[in-house]
Amino acid sequence: MEEMKVRLSTLWIFVMFNMVFADIVGCLNPGTLEEMIAMKPAQGLLLVFSILLEIPIAMIVLSRLLKHRANRWANIIAGATTILWVIGGGNTSASYIFFATNEVASMVLIIWYAWKWTTR
């Protein structure tokens, strides 16, 4: 059981690094920072984005701490939610597509591991 917890947590770490570097590299695209500043997003929208970004961060720890049943469902739900966020919140730059592909593949693996995880 501990091996699966470590595996899931490690995959969430991989997802997080990809998310962080997708954002860093994305900001290097000419005009991106200016567009973001010009949008002047509302505080509520920024809070929603923050909550969605917190899901994979929290799953790094929760994958190690939660008991089996809660852990399975948390990973399945968090994985599916984050896949939707990555696909729906992205752009069409080559770098984003590269990082998003890695993220989605990792989260599909997380969901698959969690779905197949038994206590036997």
Image: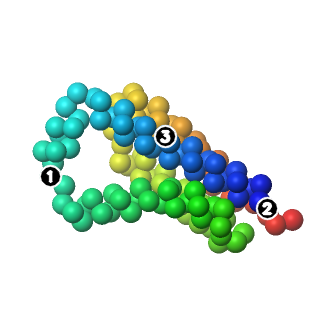
Q: Earlier in the sequence, mark 2 or mark 1?
A: 2
Task: Give the labeled residue for mark 3.
Answer: 18
Task: Give the labeled residue for mark 2.
Answer: 1
Question: What is the spatial separation of the Cα atoms under label 2 and label 1, in whole angstroms?
Answer: 46 Å
Residue 40 numbered mark, or none: 1
Please tell me which residue is depicted at 30% across the width and 63% down the height of the picture. 47
Q: Is residue 107 visible?
A: no
Residue 99 location (% of width, % of height): 47, 36
Q: Earlier in the sequence, mark 3 or mark 2?
A: 2
Kindly identify the amino acid type of the residue bearing the numbered disc 3.
Asn
Quarter in which the C terminus is drawn: bottom right
Please tell me which residue is depicted at 28% across the width and 29% down the height of the picture. 29
Tell me the element at label 1. Answer: loop
Please tell me which residue is depicted at 35% across the width and 59% down the height of the picture. 50
Residue 94 location (% of width, % of height): 39, 27
The extreme right residue here reads 120
Q: Residues within 10 Å of mark 1 (few under 14, many from 20)?
A: few
Tell me the element at label 2. Answer: loop
Query: 81 or 47: nearer the eye?
Result: 47
Question: What is the spatial separation of the Cα atoms under label 3 and label 2, in whole angstroms?
Answer: 26 Å
